[in-house]
Amino acid sequence: MAELKQATYRVAGDYDIHLADTGSGPVVVFIHGSGPGASGQSNFRQNIDAFVAAGYRVILPDMIGYGASSKPEGIDYPLQLFTDTLYDALRQHGIERATLVGNSLGGGVALQMTLDHPEFTDKLVLMAPGCVAEQASYFTMPGITKMVSNFGGPDFNLAEQRRLITNLLHPDWADKIPDELVAERFAVARTQPKDVLMRMKTPNLGLRLHEVDKPIFVMWGLNDEFCPESHARLFLDACRNVRCLTFARTGHWVQVERASEFNKYAIDFLNEQS
């Protein structure tokens, strides 16, 4: 894998946001999703080299509450907090414009950042983006039920971490989870407060999709049990410049389960002239 340069920035609220940086060329910011143990590098490890080889500079942030960034306890975690702290760190890192690639919660952050700072976003690549429906509706999804866990407790272990990752994937891919990924996410999960999940608050940005005028590429797994694939239609109905691609026998992690295809389709999209 390409060598990653590490940096940490103090942002508003006196929090630290960590990011990794590699490659050169137009900037692509990969924004990870939520869940115990999530981080930028663990979510996108199979995508970094392909984008660097294609001539792009890859930025891998850890959002607040995740990875190597600050993990405050006793606070709410609204979407605006994730967005504002990440944007602050990216600007301190010297990033003035970027394509935003977001999965799940990261897709919601990418949308919120684009709505807040339209001049910052070049294009959007979204994989099963969240935050496009009322928050309560996501809790009806079967994947959320399966994520009930002893995360944060003394009995949380590697086997439970593996089960949580398995829930994100279609059964075809579940036995291909490397031990290194489980261990990497377990190390992060052991440092996370439950607040980062239990006190997360997300708006319904589906009501504002018509305001997004950037080129958008949405990818979804047909068998996603966290963010329903039917939400792709929200983008098709509302956005001016959007394409959607659905993968059969694929769960919530298109960029992992369909890594080679995701890399090719996303890079082709980035290479197109707007």
Image (spheres, rainbow, N blue to C red):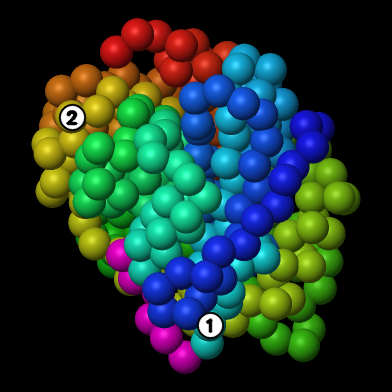
Relative to 211, 77 lies left or right: right
Badge 2 marks a residue whose secondary structure is: loop
Is disc 1 placed on a helix, strand or loop? loop
Which residue is nearer to you in this view: 9 or 207?
9
Residue at x 78%, y 84% (from the top left corner): 155
For the question of whether residue 20 can be seen, the reply is: yes
The x, y position of residue 127, in whole percent, is: 45, 36
Residue 253 placement (x, y as % from top left): 57, 40
Q: Amino acid at mark 2?
A: Asp
Q: Which residue is the site of mark 1?
A: 72
Quarter of the picture containing the N terminus is top right
| Residue 141 in view of the camera | no
Residue 78 lies within the magenta run: yes
- Please say whether residue 252 is one of the residues in the magenta stretch: no
Please give the label number shown on residue 213. Answer: 2
To which quarter of the image does residue 50 belong?
Answer: top right
**Residue found at x 81% / y 73%:** 157
Question: Closest to the observer: 110 or 172?
Answer: 110
**CA neighbours of label 1 inside 10 A, class few (<14), some (14 to 19), many (20+):** some
